[in-house]
Image: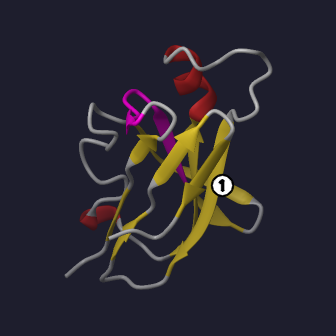
Amino acid sequence: MAGYLTTHVLDTARGCPAEGLKITLFALNGVDREVLAEMVTNADGRTDSPILPVERFRTGQFELVFAAGDYLRASGQGAPEPLFLDEIPIRFGMNDAGAHYHVPLLLSPYGYSTYRGS
């Protein structure tokens, strides 16, 4: 089995999936960052396809950047400015070329959490 990367974003303040949230995936190499993918979450808070699909999967250090501020503003949770949370970067490593990595985000205007999901 070949590896791949997925995510899921849930709006815990509203109790629903976070639809329309932009996500950017970067590969990290020291201080250098390479954009690998940009996607937007669907009505289920997921991307329509893996962020890093089987055919492009590789191991290494990565960063997912969630455009939480844009989502919070669009969903009416964006006042007052400046927002407490705007862009949320999550750095993580993938070292198993055959694994499914799932990095979910639980989001509210004043906090977030993440974990390695399944």
The answer to whether residue 74 is magenta is no
Q: Which residue is mark 1?
A: 33
Q: How is the image coloured?
A: secondary structure
Q: Nearer the viewer, residue 20 or 18?
A: 18
Q: In the displayed structure, would residue 10 be above or below residue 70?
A: below
Residue 82 in picture, x, y percent from top left: 80, 21
Q: Residue at x 66, y 38 (%)?
A: 87
Mark 1 belongs to which amino acid?
Answer: Arg
Residue 48 in picture, x, y percent from top left: 24, 41
Q: In the displayed structure, would residue 94 be above or below residue 24?
A: below
The magenta region covers: 15-26
Q: Is residue 84 left or right of residue 36?
A: right
Q: Nearer the viewer, residue 4 or 15?
A: 15
In which quadrant is the C terminus drawn? Answer: bottom left
Residue 110 in picture, x, y percent from top left: 69, 38
- Within 10 Å of disc 1 (Cα), the crowding (few <14, some 14-19, many 20+) is some
Q: Residue at x 63, y 27 (%)?
A: 69
Q: Is residue 5 left or right of residue 28?
A: left
Please identify the quarter of the rendering in which residue 67 is found: top right
Please identify the quarter of the rendering in which residue 103 is found: bottom left
User: As drawn, which residue projects farthest toward the left?
Assistant: 1
Q: In the displayed structure, would residue 42 be above or below residue 82?
A: below
The answer to whether residue 22 is magenta is yes
Q: Is residue 55 left or right of residue 58?
A: left
Residue 99 in picture, x, y percent from top left: 32, 80
In which quadrant is the N terminus drawn? Answer: bottom left
Q: Nearer the viewer, residue 113 or 56?
A: 113
Q: Mark 1 falls on what kind of element?
A: strand
Q: Residue at x 40, y 36 (%)?
A: 15
